Image (cartoon, grey):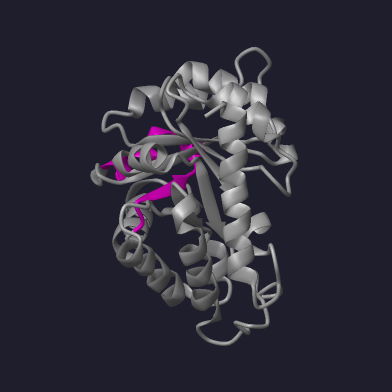
């Protein structure tokens, strides 16, 4: 949280770049062989680092191709080349007991992530093992951006599950290290979450390809200090160009996003 706040203030940015390397979309300049995921994502990281408050690699893109070692090396590169930028490992783990403890160990010790996304569906006992690392962040799924999420997250009417998660997170946040996922595609619900959790940071997916409106997100989600949001963009940044200029194009998109945020905030 200290790193996030420093990036918000020193860099005046709310942007989180999601690192989701799709083997079918990698630029020809990096190929698709061993080391390609690392080379591609490392180039994106270096090009966008001046404009971000966080990076968010999605573990499934690496694991499905047997490239976990490249993910480890990527996170290590962020820490070494761009110290102070937190890495959120998007894993969406959700289990209890020793399994949850091992998932936490995987995220925080094997990958050395600064934070990890967690599914709280199994209750507090599925979240508590992560609190053994009080200097790391725990990002709870609350109101996700996908269309089908309403089936559970908006139920029951009047007292929906996503509000129950927000209230619980406020109570569990003893180390000031919790965040919530609040999708850009439901800005009014994002505002309801903000009202429930105060200054707690919100990780906001859904801008760009999913159709979330940035102005609405800022209107409903910013704290009184004009901060509190980690707005994720993945495909729009990663695949801004499929040519040899892919990293420069990614940097331009990231810079344009930050400029638009400042314009909308009037800063």
Magenta run includes residue 124: yes
Residue at image position (74%, 38%) is: 147
Closer-to-camera residue (125/76): 76
Question: Which of the pair 223/113 is nearer the observer?
Answer: 223
**Nearest to the observer: residue 67 or residue 52:** 52
| Residue 250: image location, x then y, percent | 61, 61
**The N terminus: image quadrant:** top left
**Location of residue 266 (image quadrant):** top right
Magenta stretch, residue numbers: 113-131
What residue do we see at 61% from left, 45% from top?
257
Image position of 213 (left or right of 231): right
Would you place residue 48 above or below residue 69 in this image? above
Q: Residue furthest top?
A: 158
Residue 166 visible: yes
Q: Is residue 211 above or below residue 254?
A: above
Please say whether residue 111 is one of the residues in the magenta stretch: no
Asked whether residue 21 is in view, the answer is: no
User: Which residue sits at x=67%, y=27%?
Assistant: 216
* Towards the viewer: 126 or 172: 172
Residue 79: horizontal and vertical position, in percent? 32, 62
Establish if 125 lies above or below 18: above
From the viewer's perspective, is 144 left or right of 87?
A: right
């Amino acid at each position: 949280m200290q790193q996030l706040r420093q990036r918000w203030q020193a860099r005046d940015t709310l942007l989180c770049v999601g690192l989701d390397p799709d083997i079918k979309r990698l630029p020809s300049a990096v190929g698709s062989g061993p080391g390609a995921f690392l080379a591609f994502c490392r180039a994106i990281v270096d090009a966008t680092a001046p404009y971000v408050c966080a990076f968010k690699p999605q573990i499934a893109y690496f694991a499905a191709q047997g490239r976990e070692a490249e993910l480890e090396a990527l996170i290590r590169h962020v820490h070494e080349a761009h110290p102070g930028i937190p890495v959120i490992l998007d894993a969406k783990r959700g289990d209890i007991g020793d399994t949850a403890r091992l998932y936490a160990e995987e995220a925080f010790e094997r990958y050395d992530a600064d934070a990890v996304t967690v599914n709280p569906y199994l209750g507090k006992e599925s979240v508590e093992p992560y609190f053994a690392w009080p200097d790391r962040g725990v990002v709870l799924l609350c109101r996700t951006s996908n269309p089908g999420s309403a089936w559970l997250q908006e139920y029951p009417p009047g007292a929906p599950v996503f509000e129950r998660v927000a209230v619980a997170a406020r109570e569990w946040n003893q180390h000031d290290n919790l965040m919530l996922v609040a999708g850009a595609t439901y800005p009014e619900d994002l505002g309801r979450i903000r009202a429930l959790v105060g200054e707690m940071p919100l990780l906001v997916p859904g801008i760009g390809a999913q159709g979330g409106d940035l102005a609405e997100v800022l209107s409903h989600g910013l704290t009184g200090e004009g901060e509190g949001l980690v707005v994720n963009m993945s495909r729009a940044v990663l695949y801004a160009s499929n040519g040899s200029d892919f990293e420069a194009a990614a940097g331009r998109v990231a810079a344009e996003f930050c400029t638009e945020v400042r314009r909308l905030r009037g800063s």
